[in-house]
């Protein structure tokens, strides 16, 4: 073999080794990144241990929202794009809970065991299960239809707090010609009376009650803070206040500032858990930031469920996860 051929052969061998090394390094980094996302990286005292597994239950769902604990230890959530409600049993098996859900989004049970949902196909709030009890609770305010009912929480008296985040308009698309009720927070009393509580939130999204039901929390997707309202005896609320500053507050791909704040959950100690752009942000009952849990995908909503409500279930971007927590979720409500 000539000297030139030997040189070329050596160069080819070196290039192959470099490519193999690059692939090996890339695979190692990918595995490290995946491992980091499959476990909690930093402990949040009383909430979750470092190294706690972020268990992927399943992915491939079509529009993941509205998780809620089921009485049998499982949990249900909505697949808005598939127009169904899906059940995940305590052993992780999945099944259809309800087909043709009218685009159900947020879910909640009342004391009678009826499942109430906010619905985005034919926009309304109402009972969807059992079928024999299905009925509409509200579908408009002052004659104007809701834009996009988003989330709800049911109090101990059977009153329903819910958000209407408004019609989604894609960038560079004209506004709809149909007139809708403006984005707001609403309350349906146990007697069925509808009241608009707050209409000064840019994009109201997730909604939750403190364990003692004296404070109403609202996630403002386009704002920097989770909002809070003190609740009066008749279910109405006082003045809006900033409860907690969100680390997820940043510019999105369109250059717009937003926190991505979505679903909310509370544990038995009154801590508030928020799905945001950076994962799950956890706050004390006083609004102090306690830490955050990064996930493989950006979460959309979350709820405590399972035996003793000792697991935090999270859904988002077509996936469902389970995380064991050190403090159980509040047991006084399904959500």
Image: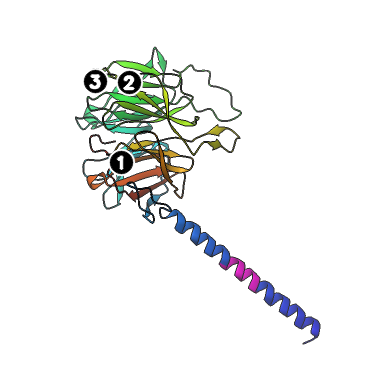
Nearer mark to the viewer, of 3 and 1: 3
Do callouts 3 and 1 mark residues in contact (Cβ within 8 Å)? Answer: no
Q: Which residue appears farthest toward the top when viewing the image?
A: 142
Marks 3 and 1, the one that precedes in the sequence: 1
Element assignment for label 3 = loop
Nearer mark to the viewer, of 1 and 2: 2
* Numbered tag placed on residue 187 in the rendering: 2
How many numbered badges does the structure rendering display? 3
Where in the figure is residue 135, as x and y percent of width and height? 27, 24
* Numbered tag placed on residue 190 in the rendering: 3
Q: Nearer the viewer, residue 217 or 207?
A: 217
Residue at 37% of width from left, 44% of height from top?
Answer: 314
Q: Give the colour scheme shown.
A: rainbow
Q: Nearer the viewer, residue 157 or 49?
A: 49
Residue at 23% of width from left, 17% of height from top?
Answer: 191
> How many residues crowd around disc 2 within 10 Å: few (fewer than 14), some, or many (20 or more)?
many
Residues in magenta?
17-24
Q: Which residue is mark 1?
A: 76
Q: Which residue appears farthest toward the left when viewing the image?
A: 112
């Amino acid at each position: 073999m000539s000297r030139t051929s030997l040189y070329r052969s050596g160069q080819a061998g070196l290039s192959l080794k470099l490519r193999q090394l690059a692939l090996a390094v890339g695979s190692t980094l990918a595995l490290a990144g995946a491992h980091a996302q499959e476990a909690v990286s930093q402990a949040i005292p009383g909430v979750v241990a470092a190294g706690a597994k972020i268990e992927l239950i399943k992915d491939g769902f079509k529009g993941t929202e509205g998780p809620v604990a089921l009485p049998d230890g499982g949990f249900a959530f909505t697949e808005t794009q598939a127009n169904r409600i899906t059940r995940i049993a305590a052993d992780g098996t999945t099944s259809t809970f309800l087909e043709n859900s009218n685009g159900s989004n947020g879910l909640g049970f009342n004391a009678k065991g009826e499942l109430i949902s906010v619905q985005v196909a034919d926009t309304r709030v109402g009972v969807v299960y059992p079928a024999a009890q299905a009925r509409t609770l509200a579908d408009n305010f002052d004659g104007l239809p809701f834009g996009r009912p988003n989330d709800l929480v049911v109090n101990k008296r059977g009153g329903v707090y819910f958000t209407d985040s408004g019609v989604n308009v894609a960038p560079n698309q004209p506004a709809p010609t149909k007139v809708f009720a403006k984005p707001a927070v609403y309350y349906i009393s146990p007697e069925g009376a509808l009241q608009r509580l707050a209409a000064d939130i840019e994009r109201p999204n997730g909604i939750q009650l403190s364990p003692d039901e004296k404070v109403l929390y609202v996630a403002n997707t386009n704002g920097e803070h989770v909002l809070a309202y003190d609740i009066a005896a008749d279910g109405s609320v006082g003045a809006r206040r900033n409860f907690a500053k969100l680390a997820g507050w940043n510019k999105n791909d369109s250059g717009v500032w937003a926190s991505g704040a979505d679903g909310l959950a509370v544990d038995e100690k009154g801590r508030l858990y928020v799905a945001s752009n950076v994962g799950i942000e956890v706050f004390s009952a006083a609004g102090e930031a306690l830490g955050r849990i990064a996930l493989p995908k950006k979460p959309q909503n979350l709820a405590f469920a399972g035996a003793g409500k000792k697991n935090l279930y999270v859904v988002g971007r077509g996936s469902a996860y389970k995380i064991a927590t050190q403090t159980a979720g509040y047991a006084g409500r399904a959500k």
